[in-house]
Amino acid sequence: MKFAVVKTGGRQYIVSEGSKLKVNRLVGEIGGKVELSAVLIANGAKIELGRPLVEGKTVEAEIVSQGKDKKVTIFKMKRRKRYRRLKGHRQQITELKVTKI
């Protein structure tokens, strides 16, 4: 089974052909192609380790959807001080389907 470890948006993901993943927002339209060139590990006929990146390897993916992730709630409170703060945040995400390693 071919797999790769790619880096995008400051995070690392293990991907294989046909897998779907949610990453931080990438510019592009639904159905568009994205090329992830920051490949840290690639597994084909043999495992290639990058130092820090594998030369000449890329991962191609298709944009499935653009949207927002689940809501994250931030709550701060100091007891006996009448201090309470409630905030929420929804991260912009892009869902990708890996087409080729």
Image (cartoon, grey):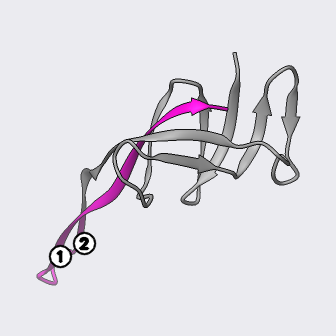
Residues 60 and 38: in front is: 60
Report the number of discs: 2
- Nearest to N terminus: mark 1 or mark 2: 2
Residue 67 on the magenta segment: no
Residue that protrudes farthest toward the left in the picture: 82
Secondary structure at numbered mark 2: strand
Q: Which residue position holds label 1?
A: 85
Task: Check whether the beta carbons of the residues at disc 1 and disc 2 lie within 8 A of each other.
Answer: yes
Residue that protrudes farthest toward the front in the picture: 32
- Horizontal side of 55 relative to 17 (left or right) equals right
- Horizontal side of 27 relative to 8 (left or right) equals left
Q: Main secondary structure of the magenta part?
A: strand
Residue that protrudes farthest toward the top in the picture: 1
Is 50 placed above or below 100 here?
Answer: below
Q: Amino acid at mark 2?
A: Lys
Residue 6: image location, x then y, percent: 65, 45
Structural crowding at the residue carrying mark 2, measured as other residues with C-alpha within 10 Å and reported as few (<14), some (14–19) or many (≥20)? few
Which residue is depicted at the point 64% across and 51% down? 7
The magenta span reads 74-101
Residue 5: image location, x then y, percent: 68, 39
Residue 84 on the magenta segment: yes
Which residue is depicted at the point 17% across and 76% down? 85
Residues 70 and 83: in front is: 70
Which residue is depicted at the point 53% across and 39% down? 61
Q: How far apart are the two marked residues, 1 and 2, measured between alpha carbons? A: 5 Å
Checking the image for residue 76, the label placed there is 2
Q: Amino acid at mark 1?
A: Arg
Secondary structure at numbered mark 1: strand
Structural crowding at the residue carrying mark 1, measured as other residues with C-alpha within 10 Å and reported as few (<14), some (14–19) or many (≥20)? few
Residue 59: image location, x then y, percent: 65, 40
Is 81 placed above or below 28 here?
Answer: below
Q: Quadrant of residue 43?
A: top right
